[in-house]
Structure formats: C-alpha cells, structure tokens
C-alpha cells in the first residue's frame, strides 16, 4: 500500500467479500471541506515559526564557553576596549547586553545598570518572538477541527433526514468519517504547535536565567572599577 494512501473499509455487502475502497490521503483531506483551508494555513505558519525559532535561538543563545571566559577576563583586567571588540559583530544576546553596558561606562553605576537591564529585557523580548503565534496555533487548530467535524455531522444528518428510503450503513459511516477528518487534522497541527511552544519556552527560560547571571556579573565587575 502506498504511504500516501489509506484504506477505508466501507459498510457494504462487498466488504464481506473482502473488497476495500482505497482513498488517497489527499482526497481524504479534501473531504474535510473549507475548514481544512485555515487548518492548512495554521500548519504552514507553525512550520515557519518552528524553523525560525530553531535557527534564531541556535544563533543567539548558544554562546561558546571560551568566548564568555575571554570576555570576563578582559572585563576583570579593565580592558573595556578588548571586551567591546569581542562583543562587536557577535549575534549573541549576551554580547549585545554587555556592549550596551560598556557604552555607558563613563556614566554613574545606576545608569550602567539601567542600560544593561533595558538591553536584557529587549533581548528576552526578541527570544520570545513567534511564541505567541505558536500558542495561538496550538489552541486554534483543534478548535477549527472540532468546528469542521460539527459542520460535517450536521450535513451528514441533514442528508439522512432527506432520505425517503431506508438509510444505508454506508451513507452513515461515510458522512461520519469525512466529518472526523478535520478533527484529526486540527489535533495533529495543535499537538505539534503545543509541543514546540513548550520546548522553546523551556529553552528561553534557561537562556534568560543565564543572561541575567552574565549581566549581574558584568555589573559587579564594573562597579569595582576606580571610576565607580
């Protein structure tokens, strides 16, 4: 059986003879009706948000230990120019935070601390980009799926109500499985979005904690400079 083909056994006399009606997965999804369009759109947005966050977080929070040690060594030695040179051109969140503090070194300690805190808050906001989108998809996709199922069930029962003859099991089962397609699709998209949301949230929380530690360590170092 082809991987893109699913077998559906219809309730008809031919079933007893071992006959199976095969329906392609694509055609099965099309039977879900217009509700499948927004679910498809949500799935595309979810893939975009997941890939974008994977790439962005990898570049932003994966800071080599040797770079952090070199930066702290430069700061402890009072070589602010060397520390700034290490931060320039780096896409690390901590590099931008430290650079914001270095630029205010000639100011009072409170101003330096405020600059570092503001830069850290800005970096946390950047880390959380597209998280709200994933959270919305995780809740909206299953709801759209349920909506499609309800609409499909209504149509199926309306079709049965209009039947003047005896209702066949095939008509009943066919309408029900077509209606359930949207629920399955919505749940799949919602589950993927929800798992991705929780995964990124955990990574961002860890990165935020490390960012706060590095920022506090920078403030402690510069407060011991002779000018402060």
Image: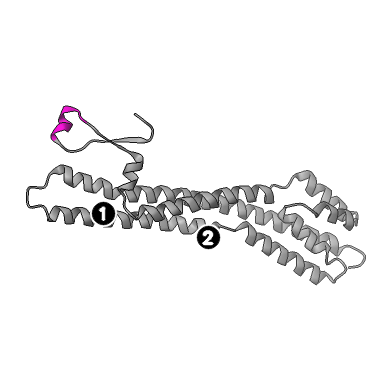
Residue 23 in sight: yes
Instruction: Kindly identify the residue that appears in the image at 38 percent across and 33 percent down.
Output: 3
Kindly identify which residue carries mark 2: 132
Total count of labels: 2
Q: Nearer the viewer, residue 220 or 60?
A: 60
Q: Secondary structure at mark 2?
A: helix
Q: Nearer the viewer, residue 52 or 96?
A: 52
Q: Position of residue 129 (x, y in %)?
A: 59, 58
Please identify the dominant SS of the magenta region. helix
Position of the N terminus, as image quadrant, is top left
Kindly identify which residue carries mark 1: 152
Asked if residue 121 lies in the magenta stretch, the reply is no
Task: Find the magenta span and give its range.
Answer: 13-19
Residue 198 in sight: no
Nearest to N terminus: mark 2 or mark 1: 2
Q: Secondary structure at mark 1?
A: helix
Q: How many neighbours does mark 2 have within 10 angstroms: few (below 14), some (14-19), or many (20 or more)?
A: few
Residues at badges 2 and 1 in contact (C-beta under 8 Å)?
A: no
Q: How many neighbours does mark 1 have within 10 angstroms: few (below 14), some (14-19), or many (20 or more)?
A: many
Q: Which mark is residue 58?
A: none
């Amino acid at each position: 059986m082809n991987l893109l083909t699913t077998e559906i056994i219809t309730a008809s006399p031919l079933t007893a003879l071992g006959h199976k009606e095969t329906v392609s997965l694509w055609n099965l999804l099309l039977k879900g009706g217009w509700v499948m369009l927004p679910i498809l759109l949500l799935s595309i947005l979810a893939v975009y948000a997941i890939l974008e966050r994977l790439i962005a977080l990898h570049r932003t929070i994966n800071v080599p230990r040797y770079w952090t040690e070199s930066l702290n060594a430069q700061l402890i030695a009072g070589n602010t120019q060397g520390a700034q040179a290490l931060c320039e051109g780096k896409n690390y969140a901590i590099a931008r935070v430290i650079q914001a503090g270095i630029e205010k070194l000639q100011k009072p300690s409170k101003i330096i601390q405020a600059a570092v805190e503001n830069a850290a808050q800005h970096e946390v906001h950047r880390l959380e980009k597209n998280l709200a989108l994933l959270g919305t998809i995780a809740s909206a996709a299953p709801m759209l799926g349920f909506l499609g199922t309800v609409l499909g069930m209504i149509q199926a029962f309306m079709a049965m109500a209009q039947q003047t003859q005896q209702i066949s099991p095939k008509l009943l089962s066919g309408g029900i499985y077509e209606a359930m397609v949207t629920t399955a699709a919505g749940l799949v998209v919602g589950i993927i979005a929800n798992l991705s949301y929780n995964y990124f949230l955990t990574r961002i929380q860890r990165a935020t904690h490390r960012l706060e530690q590095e920022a506090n360590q920078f403030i402690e170092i510069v407060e011991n400079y002779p000018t402060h």
